[in-house]
Image (tube, rainbow, N blue to C red):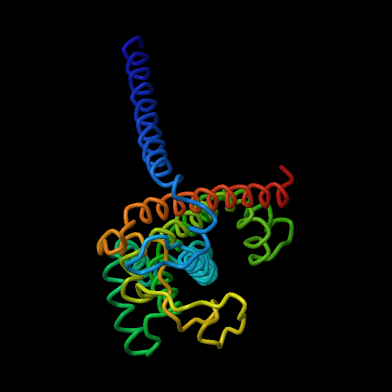
Amino acid sequence: MIGSRNSERIATAIFYLIALLVSVLLAALIGYILYQGLSVINWHFLTAAPLPYQAGGGIGPEIFNSLMLLVLTMALTVPLGLGVGIYLSEYAREGRITRAIRICIESLASMPSIVIGIFGLMLFVVIFKWGFSVISGVMALTALNLPVMTRLAEDAIKNVSPDLREASLALGATQWQTITDVVLVAAIPGLVTGIILSAGRVFGEAAALLYTAGTTTSALNFTDLNPLSNNSPFYLLRPAETLAVHIWQVNSEGLNPDATQIANGASAVLVIMVLIFNLVSRWAGNWLFSKKTGQ
């Protein structure tokens, strides 16, 4: 008995140590990036366009492109991933077809992003003739994130207690009413985690976008809201360099005199955007869960 208690204490201490180590590493990484980049950030840097081969440029278009690709990608990824997750967890019968679908999903989820980029280049850029554009990047990111979102949605729905389903059905609710009003509500915390992980991949992805969205940004006129105008920021067939791609390009080319400062500032902005999105998503998920459950 004493030996088992000592083993339990040792195991608990090890787990606490691992958690502390991970927290310290994360805090050190974020702190270092912010320390290097916050001094570069100002209003001009956040709103101005980059200046090729010159110092003093900004990252305004890249911030907009990153947010635009995030919104469009999640607008496709979340409904599709949630739909497939509902089908696999609530409707599909276990069999060869279901196992084949899961194998395909797991294989796609582990696919290197550079392969998705080459696939997007051949299909969306060349065959569909969309060129290096917003829509090509969105489709590539959707193909990259859809398997992950599907898998996480399926797990979140499956983890809902069967008692909730049985109670709802016993009260006369249909299966669809049970799924929408009971199961999905109980699965909100897990679904929010899936959304955050998928959005993080969108923010940080560079390899897939190099071959689809491009490494340049056309001159944008933010007063032109016509999505069919070539200079409109909402034109889907224009090239759209994101923050992650811009950081890679500035560091790899090194043609700007202040390349290091640009990369540091852009990295800090990207980290801040990810943190804000995570906090807002968690808050929105908790608020929706509380409103639906009354807890």
Q: Is residue 218 above or below residue 177?
A: below
Q: What x and y, as percent, mark residue 126?
A: 32, 87
Q: Position of residue 145 (x, y in %)?
A: 41, 65
Query: Which part of the image, by quadrant, shows the C terminus?
Result: top right
Quick check: 177 above or below 124? above
Tally of numbered tags: 0
Identity of the residue drawn at 32% across and 53% down: 260
User: In this view of the protein, which residue sits in the foreground, 26 or 221?
Assistant: 221
* Image position of 201 (left or right of 260): right
Q: In this orientation, does residue 81 appear?
A: no
Location of residue 184 in the rendering, given as x and y in whole percent from the top left corner: 61, 57
Residue 262 point in image, percent of width and height: 38, 56
Using the image as rendered, state which of residue 23 and residue 163 is in the foreground. 23
Foreground of the two, 118 or 86: 118
Residue at left 47%, top 65%? 66
| Above or below for 98 versus 14 | below
